[in-house]
Amino acid sequence: MNKVLIAGNWKMNGLTGDATREAAALADGVAEVAHVLLMIAPPTTLIHPLRIKLFERGIADRVAVGGQDCHAEVNGAHTGDVSAEMIADLGGSHVIVGHSERRTDHGESDAMVKAKAEAALRAGLVAIVCVGETEAERRGGETLAVLARQVAGSLPEGATVKNTVIAYEPVWAIGTGLTPSTDDIVEAHAAIRATAADRMDATDNLRILYGGSVKPGNAAELLALDGVDGALVGGASLKAADFLAIAAAAPARA
Ligand code: PGA
């Protein structure tokens, strides 16, 4: 089985001083979480500064850095956008695509998310494709149908267990302190894996992360669940101590 991946999403938070401070704090604790893979997606402005600070601390090979979004094109007249190639150029190795805040705030459809994920693969990045139901969809009993539609519509052509990760993030659980029941998470991950299996060769080793209010206090329970291969962490990734505590709670896998 794959090592667990703990991915941090700083969202629109952090200035260069934060990158310096977080890299130092990560360096202090990273040796204790050698059993997991770590990735941080800071704002685009901090990809390079964070990489430099991780290098200076000697942990650039232990903490991967990535983007929070990318444009589908390589370059062109797209003011304010960043391509996957640009993230790779800064030393990024991953990019989150289809986060619910992008889907909601920027009207991103499954087709757009798929195109972005394909751009990630084109640039040699690992695509972290986010899916998840809204509160209304869950109440309406549509969760599994929504997940199936999003996975089928958002997975890139050429997806493999090496270049693609899926993050299950119920929209209503993001930043709210709420999480689904453990049974609901296991059910959702199994459904996502089953849909992905229609689009990919082998999905036993496909990493499916859970995201939404993951904290040091609930990480051990969430990360031990069947079919949960890591976490995508928002708020609690902003402090290295919490991020590392979540990583420490992850089970060791070969
Ligand atoms: P949260 O965010 O951990 O703050 O709930 C998760 C995410 O949006 O990836």
Image (cartoon, helix red, strand yellow):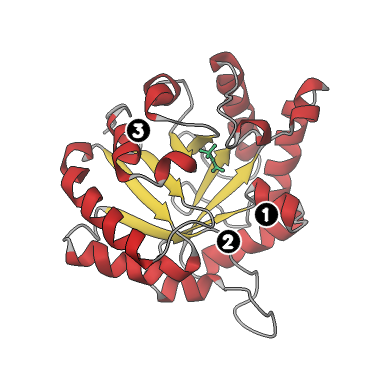
- Type of amino acid at the residue the image marks with label 1: Arg
Mark 2–mark 3 CB contact (< 8 Å): no
Mark 2 secondary-structure assignment:
loop
Alpha carbon distance from label 1 to label 2: 8 Å
Q: Would you name the residue on which mark 2 appears?
A: 69
**Disc assigned to residue 102:** 1
Within the image, what quadrant is residue 32 found in? top left
Residue 213 makes an appearance in the image: yes
Left or right: 248, with 57 as reference point: right
Q: Would you name the residue on which mark 3 appears?
A: 246
Classify 253 as above or below 46.
Answer: above
The mark that comes first in sequence, 2 or 3, is 2
Left or right: 222, with 143 as reference point: left
Report the image quarter containing ligand 1.
Answer: top right
* Figure quadrant of the C terminus: top left
Classify 77 as above or below 166.
Answer: below
* Residue plotted at (34% across, 56% down): 64
Q: Nearer the viewer, residue 191 or 230?
A: 230
